[in-house]
Image: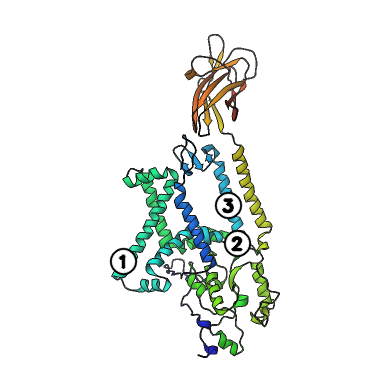
Amino acid sequence: MNLSSAPYPNDIKRVGVEPVNARRNRQPRYAPRKKIFPKRAEGRFRRFKWIVMLITLGIYYLAPWVRWDRGPYAPDQAILIDLCSRRFFFFFIEIWPQEFYYVAGLLVMAGFGLFLVTSAVGRAWCGYACPQTVWVDLFLVVERAIEGDRNARMKLDAGPMSFAKLRKRVVKHSIWLLIGVVTGGAWIFYFADAPSLFVSLLTGRAPAAAYTTVAILTATTYVLGGLMREQVCTYMCPWPRIQGAMLDENSLVVTYNDWRGEQRSRHAKKALVNGLSVGDCVDCNACVAVCPMGIDIRDGQQMECITCALCIDACDGVMDKLGKPRGLIAYATLSEYSSNMSVATDEGRTAVQPSRVRNEDGTFVPAIRHFDWRIIYRPRTVFYAVAWASVGVAMLVHLTFRERLELNVVHDRNPQYVLESDGSLRNGYTVRVLNMVPTPRDVNISLVGLEGATMRIPEFGKEDARSFTVHAEPDAATTLKVFVTRKPTGAAINEFLFVIEDTDHADRATYRAAFNAPGDIK
């Protein structure tokens, strides 16, 4: 065969595929969905996606089964959202309802983290760690295992219904539904003891809310991950429309470097023999075939692109076969791309000229910019990183030094005070002692201030004193009725402190209370 007329360099076959979400040919708003049959990619980014998928799914499905010993008075599930007791357990951390600001802090950290990742490496969250992406990848694994890769799936989809086709479809959708059931089941295990709830689910003794939640999550996982796929990212998710505010000219995004790829030619050797200038792109459509979003990255940046980088793997494989350097499609910044494009087009005065970017030996000219990891460290990313770390450190410091003993006092509303036969005044209070550790302890409650006053706790007897020792149950609130009595002293000070502290003085809490008397403004 005459190599100069070979239709495809080194037998690189052109994939017959058109981008479903082509920017140059937008579909009408309510056009029927066109199915996408992404070809399996191989390469470093695909391997990285496998790793991320295994880690994220492993954490999600297995985390409720991890045990953590907190002693005999607390649950031993490492991660537990205990709605009945209104507490959240995360290994050695326990968060109570009044400490919801920790959850708010985590949400702030998540926001700054997302801003940091997006400003540094574009929509890497969408391409690698978003639950929609992870479950779609998982569903595609099942689909390929049953129906084959791209061509086989397209042929099966276009063919008439047969027993073999029906069998494959039933098996595929059954496994998808099973994945949905497991997904919903794993979710509810975070809200109750996983082994006990699992047995209850199997025996039909679980609460109706558990079965309802599993059914809803099964349906959403099946529909979003198996049937809608890319439409969730394109039409339902707001992040593609927000990301523009997070990107700048130094953000890394998946980029087709047309400064070295144009002009495209499927007959490169013939074109070179004829003295024509051609770029590295052989228009094989490998990048389009592997794209799970159905776009052509060569059209430039698009809202649908989730920067999963599978097109990079596909293109790098073609470049390897052609003996050309990788990176025709690569993570690049806008500033880097614009600089190289300026070199290739003589600052926009001509079309892309391959001779302007390469030396005679095929290497790139010195003016061509290449990725420098230091570009990630710039004011915007540093600000996001510092803000993210600051919130995290502040939360850790507060967690370390927070008090695990709290006191809340409510004055009786009616009557405001009682005048006793000896002229003394008595006020009633409801005192709530919150022991926030998973062990019982003895707590001393005392009065500070209010000279001449004593208190009485009816359940301890009729004794009056300035202090009492209360047994506080582990991880629970102990509620006491307390009467404070004060003999007439003529003093005008009607404020005092309830003070609680455990017997070894490890924790201490106070509450400023008012002692009402005749003539006080209520």
Say whether residue 290 is left or right of residue 327: left
Question: What number is the disc on residue 323?
Answer: none
How far apart marks 2 and 3 lie (CA) works out to 15 Å
Q: Count the numbered circles shown.
A: 3
Disc 2, SS: helix
Say whether residue 311 is left or right of residue 206: right
Disc 3, SS: helix
Mark 2 or mark 1, which is nearer to you?
A: 1
The residue indicated by pointer 1 is 167
Three-letter residue code for mark 3: Gly
Residue most extreme to the left: 163
Three-letter residue code for mark 2: Val
Residue most extreme to the top: 422
Image coordinates for residue 460, horizontal then vertical, percent: 49, 18
In this view of the protein, can residue 236 be seen by the observer? no
Q: Earlier in the sequence, mark 3 or mark 1?
A: 3
Image coordinates for residue 69, horizontal then vertical, percent: 49, 40
How far apart marks 3 and 1 lie (CA) works out to 45 Å
Residue plotted at (56% across, 33% down):
404
Mark 1 neighbour class, 10 Å CA radius: few under 14, some 14 to 19, many 20 or more: few
Image coordinates for residue 257, horizontal then vertical, percent: 60, 73
In this view of the protein, can residue 293 be seen by the observer? yes
Q: Earlier in the sequence, mark 2 or mark 3?
A: 3
Are circles 3 and 1 on residues that touch, CB within 8 Å? no
The residue indicated by pointer 3 is 111
463 in relation to 218, above or below: above
Three-letter residue code for mark 1: Arg
The residue indicated by pointer 2 is 121
Mark 3 neighbour class, 10 Å CA radius: few under 14, some 14 to 19, many 20 or more: few
Are circles 2 and 1 on residues that touch, CB within 8 Å? no
Image coordinates for residue 503, horizontal then vertical, percent: 57, 25
59 in relation to 81, above or below: below
